[in-house]
Image (tube, rainbow, N blue to C red):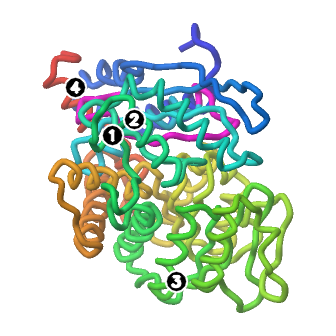
Amino acid sequence: MSNLPSEPEFEQAYTELVSTLENSTLFEQNPEYKTALKIVSIPERIIQFRVVWEDDKNQVQVNRGYRVQFNSALGPYKGGLRFHPTVNLSILKFLGFEQIFKNALTGLNIGGGKGGADFDPKGKSDNEIRKFCVAFMRELSRHIGADTDVPAGDIGVSPREIGWMFGTYKAAQNKWEGVLTGKGGSWGGSLIRPEATGYGLVYYVEHMIKYAGQGSFKGKRVAISGSGNVAQYAAIKAIELGATVVSLSDSKGALVAEGDKSFSPEDVMAIAALKVKRKALTDFDHSGKYKYVDGARPWTHVKVDIALPCATQNEVSKEEAEALIASGARFIAEGSNMGCTQAAIDVFEAHRQAKKSEAIWYAPGKAANAGGVAVSGLEMAQNSQRVPWTSEEVDGKLKNIMEEAFKNGLETAKKYVKASEGEFPSLVAGSNIAGFVKVAAAMHDQGDWW
């Protein structure tokens, strides 16, 4: 990749996958998979376009829009749209690359992709955001479809924005089809979709806890970063299962419960209401119950059993990983994509190997946070059938998918990764290998490599 512009986020994701494949016996048993790795690491297609729109002062503004259609071996490209000023090709390639293998772990027929724009919704009026969505979708609508590419929401793209883009697509293409997921419940959306990533994360960690012989969430102290959709519903589900949630955060700082205090469902919902209005945690009345730590993430300010990074990429550093281990944490699972730096993952994996059943146990986002895209896939199925499912049906299917993702990673690690007696299997290696093998096998059968 030396002849390409620097793409640090994508290179990190690529290196993390390659290192686990090379440190397993996969290539020894199947050397031909090295060819598949070369092919799967290059997107099938990258679409880049300008988005021209008018602000409330009738001034013309322009942004860059993207769609990375990474791999369609298992089905239509599937992955979110992100509206954020940091969006660039490196970030979208990293997210799309991760999405390929995450989607494979759901067991559903969906490929991997990602898209978005360097548009910043903060400080914009509702009318300006609507105008941007319309302009963005007018171009993107040429490249997507229910059987081609089905985007969803991501950072900066809520069901409201999905609605505006869906209406634009429908007008441009004269089609009502399941071309976007995360839609409103009255016009093709799935129940449990807003909750799915956070709920699925907790369901996945439940299996980690059970396998480790550590009981359940009941009585466990849980630190969560972020305060968006994933963090909110992870907190709600953890509290429902009897855990004590002691932190939430945003880009400006962290709220940490003091003493024996903890977040209640009412607190979480109040914070969720603030986030809908694009306000910061500093606007939440936390006097007497929480300590606000300006400019910090929660990991060095808590003593917990479980850590759930749910904010953004690279939000757990090597030093923070060491602090979590020192505090006695036993489980860490990513609700965000690539939430831990490679140095942090190395710390967790070294501790797992050294301390065996007493170690902290790490689960990567491509497995642990797959619940969101899983229910997006279920939404696609409901749209195809023109039949909505009940909350209980969707939640039951979500639980099954997360259980299978855990078991798949676990058994794949046992098969391909050498481990000493008493050592927990490497979920990061197992998940990487399981997702890669499924996609590579489909590519082989379709003639992409021999």
Tell me if label 3 and label 1 are in contact, CB under 8 Å.
no
User: Dot 2, how many residues are within 10 Å of its Cα: few (below 14), some (14-19), or many (20+)?
Assistant: many
Q: Nearer the viewer, mark 4 or mark 3?
A: 3
Q: Is residue 11 visible in the rendered structure shown here?
A: yes
Q: Which residues are magenta?
A: 71-90
- Provide the residue designation for mark 1: 179
213 to 349, vertically: above or below:
below
Residue, disc 2: 169
First along the sequence among labels 4 and 3: 3
* Front of the two marks 3 and 2: 2
Q: Is residue 40 above or below residue 399?
A: above
Sequence order check, earlier mark of 1 and 2: 2
Q: Amino acid at mark 1?
A: Val
Expressed as whole percent of the image width and height from the top left, the position of residue 42 reads 41, 20
Residue with the mark numbered 3: 239
Labels 3, 1: front one: 1
Quick check: is 73 in the magenta stretch? yes
Residue 216 lies in what quarter of the image? bottom left
Give the spatial CA distance, label 1 vs label 2.
Answer: 8 Å
Q: Which mark is residue 443?
A: 4
Dot 3: few (<14), some (14–19), or many (≥20) neighbours within 10 Å? many
Which residue is nearer to you in this view: 164 or 19?
A: 164
Is residue 426 in sight in this rendering?
Answer: no
Mark 4 neighbour density, 10 Å: few (under 14) some (14–19) many (20 or more): many
Front of the two marks 4 and 1? 1
- Cβ–Cβ under 8 Å for marks 2 and 4: no
Please state the horizontal and vertical placement of residue 359, each as a whole percent of the image: 52, 67
Instruction: Give the side of residue 226 with respect to residue 296, left or right.
Output: left
